[in-house]
Amino acid sequence: MENATGKKVKIGYKYGLVMLISGILLVGINVGMLYLNNSYYPKLLTVGIAIAFLSPVFFIFPGATLDKMPVGKDINKVFWKTAPGIHKVMWITWGIISIAISVIALISFDPDFVK
């Protein structure tokens, strides 16, 4: 599948944008539920925070530049195989850091601020 514009693509930018929107949406849903019902889903809040914190690394380290966008299930394989080693290391490292940050945030989170 060729690009409509003929420009080279970086799949990491698309992953980063999708992850950022998903993380913000999950955190937003939980904050909204906390204000409306005084209840929330701790696991979804933790996942949302982790995803939101992970997304910037894909903007900084977007992977290899491709001539054309892969089709279907090949996107993930091509994304991983063509990415430089330092990008993979940063993705994994920042993934571990973002999970740690989200778990610490959940442990220290006190939902009693809503009255």
Image (cartoon, rainbow, N blue to C red):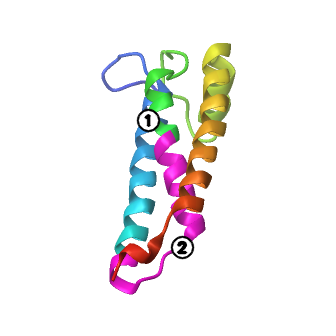
Vertical placement of residue 35 versus 53, above or below: below
**What residue lies at 43% left-to-right and 60% top-to-bottom?**
27
Secondary element at tag 2: loop
Q: Nearer the viewer, residue 40 or 68?
A: 40
Residue 62 shows in this picture: yes
Residue 85 image offset from top left, x and y in percent: 68, 14
Q: Reply yes or no: does residue 46 show up in magenta.
A: yes
| Disc number for residue 14 | 1
Residue 95 image offset from top left, x and y in percent: 62, 37
Q: Nearer the viewer, mark 1 or mark 2?
A: 2
**What residue lies at 56% left-to-right and 51% top-to-bottom?**
102
Q: Nearer the viewer, residue 19 or 14?
A: 19
- Determine which quarter of the picture holds residue 78: top right
Q: Pick out the residue farthest to the left.
A: 5
Disc 1 marks a residue whose amino acid type is: Lys
What residue is pinned by disc 2? 41
Q: Which residues are magenta?
A: 33-53
Label 1 vs 2, first from the N-terminus: 1
Disc 2 marks a residue whose amino acid type is: Tyr
Q: Main secondary structure of the magenta part?
A: helix
**What residue lies at 68% left-to-right and 31% top-to-bottom?**
77
Q: Residues within 10 Å of mark 1 (few under 14, many from 20)?
A: some
